[in-house]
Image (cartoon, grey):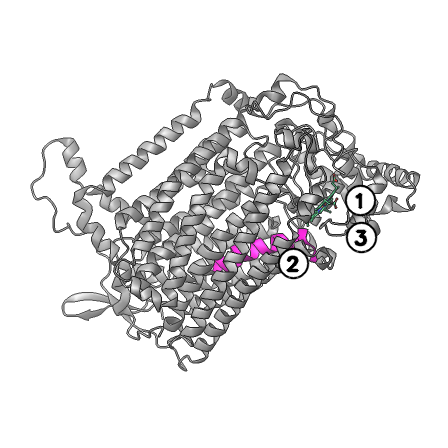
Amino acid sequence: MSLTELMSNAGLSRYAEVALLLFFFAFVIIVWRVFSPSRKQLLERQARLPLDDDHASPSRPSAE
Amino acid sequence: MSDSGSPGAATAGARLDSFSYDDVVVRKFLWATIIWGLVGFLMGLIVAIQMAFPAFNLAPWFAFGRLRPLHTNAVIFAFAGNAIFTGLYYSTQRLLKARMFSDTLSKVHFWGWQAIIVSAALTLPFGFTQAKEYAELEWPIDIAIAIVWVIFAVNVIGTLVRRRERHIYVAIWFYIASIITVAILHIFNNLVIPAGPLKSYSIYAGVQDAFMQWWYGHNAVAFFLTTPFLGLMYYFMPKAAEGPVFSYRLSIVHFWTLVFMYIWAGPHHLHYTALPEWASTLGMLFSVMLWAPSWGGMINGLLTLRGAWHKVIDDPVLKFMVVAITGYGMATFEGPMLSVKSVNALAHYTDWIVAHVHTGALSWNGFLTFGMIYWLAPRLFQAPLFSKKLAEAHFWIASFGIILYVVAIYSAGVTQGLMWRAFDETGRLAYPDFVETVARLVPMYWVRVAGGSLYIVGAILFAYNIFRTWKARPVTYEVPVVKAPPLARVSAPPAHAPAPVPAGAWARFVSLGWHRKWEGLPITFTVLTTVAVVVASLFEIIPTFLIKSNVPTIASVKPLTPLELAGRDLYIREGCFNCHSQMVRPFRYETERYGDYSKPGESVYEHPFLWGSRRIGPDLAREGGKYPDLWHVRHFENPRAISPKSIMPAYRHLLTNEMDFDGIQARVDAMVMLGVPYGEAVTGAPAMARRQAAEVAASIVQGGGESGFESKEIVAMIAYMQRLGRDAQQVVLGTNAAKHVHVDSVAPARAPAAPGGSR
């Protein structure tokens, strides 16, 4: 109950907007990192990971 | 075969581990997907027929209100769930170059999940439900779900820790985020106080319960039907197209945007309800922002086919995937649009939402699953696909089915939405009789039956094709031994690492390569994702719970009497909330039809809330006092005797079932534990209920009906019906109550005291 009163009187109407901004900035940082040129090579290698495991299955039947 | 036991084979200097993948569990999940898929689609067909042809509500347990949740649970958790596990177990092992952490956990996960599905099928038709969409299952089953899910999570995270591939492909990120988020959603939305072995009340009430439910409901769509399937797309699409994803960077951005944004979007399910304005605006804002990453993801998926479009022509796998991804794009285009308040005002409570869901479900989830399994089956069963022609036929038949379904149901939704809001020249409702707006839809419901049937025909061809493929399997499956070096403790410096140590603390900090480790450390990653999800949820949820002014109290709102509470439980048992809303929105066309709009303070004792999400029948929030008791008896006995075009099931069993008066006390007690001020009823609930039941029975006799209903369930149901909206009618609109409505033009200056004229 006291917590409820505390929160009610804390003037949190801007609360959600602040959270929105925080999330937005976190997101901008991630995008900036992803697109930094130094990561290009690494990401290209990672992109091929699903295709790497093919050697692991010697029997390669096809859908045809 | 276990990788932990097998000695690392030394080849040419480098130490290599030998191990194999566990495909046994993948094959099991694959069969479960196919079988539950057929069951779930069939349930859909049954409820579709019931809407077009109400006599098909054959028994209390075979009625729309009870089977509709079975359909949704079957397709979401049984079909889509097992499809996710199939693809996840297959791809995770291969992407991480490691067998699953524990074969035992895999088995427990598989059988535990199937047991949960069976228990859903054994409880929902018999009326055991929590009445929250996609969270209907009662508390013992919820506990089982939590346990099985944790087992699954341990198995996956354990595999991550034991992996032999340092980098974690983006598909796995999607899996982890889904696993974590679903756990959080499930636990917090299902917090209940038990009132019996298969009966409980949500610990939240009214607005708060609605908020939790749609925080859950929306994110269930996001983290059960979207992110895991995106993980599957990012793995199986490159596999089928035999080339890497179009832009890996875009896929990472796609991931983080979804994690950061989806969780905020839930309140868009509650526009113009008694939810605080700021919350639904925030929900709308985030939903609109979601448009960008979703389309980025779709384009990324489709462009993976760059230079390989010709393959689509004769590869059914790619065909299914292309339509699936296109469906994802359409559904995620429409979703943000529907969350815009003015569009939502028209679409909400109508079939438009049903059409939206099925665009996503039938194409995105369904077709991606079909495509994935057509790709997997020959590899898992080590035999060529039985018939490519049959797969092609499946594709075309199912695609045509989807088109029939969505065209019919979109039209139904828009038609009904427009009819509800139509006024004639004299300023009165053009269709005051609700059932007129239902009867208009019946032909479209038949088209849906046709479309759904085609989809099922396709699914049967699919099952047959996979079955025949399996028949041609070798006597014993070959289990390939894979060799890979174990993960080095410390990551080797990348080839292009800058040699000189830069000056300055900041530069040194940056050059530490911490970010690479950060990504490489699955635990840290899991923790961070969890933090993002939890923080967003808290920001979103806490204000509704802790800021008093968000739910202004209304002095005249009192708890239901014991008999009314029992009636409400019958309403829950029969699943009436699947067809009836109890939430009048502040529009003139709603208040004209139903009465004063609903206020947050009205549902402070509503554990769980029963606002509903679809109006197949009229809103019932102001039902109390509208008709005499006898009218309800006749209506429940046979709705079509009163309203010939009604599609409501008959509830004759309410007239004959004995009322369990003594069971009411446990329910009142549970409500008291939740803080509902019950006063006298705390000790004498059954006696109070019997007294009121006698009154209702007497009024039925007075009206000219039969005697003897005082011991039957029908009196509880009628008592509840007659109570609906009565408390609020006594209120003179205070400043508080009107506060949340900012929609100036739509709020009526004065609401009619007794909503009449709907019949």
Residue B191 — which label?
Answer: none
Q: Is residue B48 magenta?
A: no
Bin the neighbour count of mark 2 within 10 Å (Cα to Cα): few under 14, some 14-19, many 20 and up: many
Up/down of B254 relative to B546, above or below: below
Q: Which residue has dot 1 on it?
A: B662
What percent of the width, then of the height, locates residue B148?
A: 50, 55
Up/down of B33 relative to B685, above or below: below
First reached walking from the N terminus: tag 3 or tag 2: 2
> Residue B290, located in which quarter of the rendered image?
top left
Q: Are marks 1 and 2 on the same chain?
A: yes
What percent of the width, then of the height, locates residue B458?
A: 51, 67
Q: Is residue B64 magenta?
A: yes
Residue B49 — which label?
Answer: 2
Q: Main structural element of the magenta stretch: helix, strand or loop? A: helix
> Residue B202, located in which quarter of the rendered image?
top right
Q: Nearer the viewer, mark 1 or mark 3?
A: 3
Q: Which residue has dot 3 on it?
A: B652
Identify the residue shown where x is 40% and y is 53%. B326
Q: What amino acid type is highlighted by mark number 1?
A: Asp
Q: CA distance from mark 1 to mark 2?
A: 38 Å
Examine the rendering and report whether any part of residue B604 can be seen.
Answer: no
Q: What amino acid type is highlighted by mark number 3?
A: Arg
- First to last magenta residue range: B62-82
- Along the horizontal axis of the image, is B538 left or right of B486? right
> Residue B262, located in which quarter of the rendered image?
top left
